[in-house]
Amino acid sequence: MTMVAVGSAEVPGLAVRLGRRLLVHTMHKGCRTDSAGRIREGAEAKLTDPNLTPAEAAWLRRPRSGGRE
C-alpha cells in the first residue's frame, strides 16, 4: 500500500517526481516475492479514496508490465 500511495501522489516539481520514482523503484527491487498482485489490490483500494485527484486516479489505472513502473 505504501508503494501505491507514494507512487500515485500528485506532487509538483520534477525533482520531487524523480525522487518519488526512485523511491518506488527501490522499494520494488527490495521485494523478495512478486508484488504485482498486492500492488493491484492496493491500487483498487486506493481508487475508492474520495480525496483522490483525477491525475492520481489516472496513474493508478495505467497498465504496467509485470506490475512494475
Image (cartoon, rainbow, N blue to C red):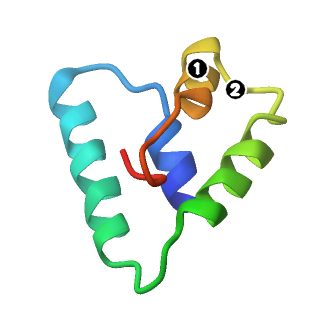
Q: Do residues under tags 2 and 1 come within 8 Å of each other at their CB atoms?
A: no
* Residue 21 drawn above or below residue 25: above
Q: Is residue 12 left or right of residue 57?
A: left
Q: Residue at x 42, y 45 (%)?
A: 65
Residue ID at (19%, 37%)? 18
Q: Earlier in the sequence, mark 2 or mark 1?
A: 2
Q: Is residue 22 above or below residue 47?
A: below
Q: Which residue is denoted by mark 1 in the rendering?
A: 58
Q: Residue furthest top?
A: 54
Crowding near the residue tagged with mark 1, few <14, some 14–19, many ≥20 C-alpha atoms within 10 Å: few
Q: Residue at x 30, y 44 (%)?
A: 20
Q: Is residue 2 left or right of residue 25?
A: right
Residue reaching furthest front?
65
Residue under the point 18% across and 23% down: 14
* Badge 2 density bin: few <14, some 14–19, many ≥20, Cα 10 Å: some
Task: Report helix, strand or loop for mark 1.
Answer: helix
Q: Is residue 11 above or below residue 65?
A: above
The residues tagged by marks 2 and 1 sit, at their Cα atoms, a distance apart of: 10 Å
Q: On residue 52, which mark appears?
A: 2
- The amino acid type of the residue labelled 1 equals Ala
2 to the left or right of 47? left
Q: Amino acid at mark 2?
A: Leu
Residue 28 placement (x, y as % from top left):
36, 66
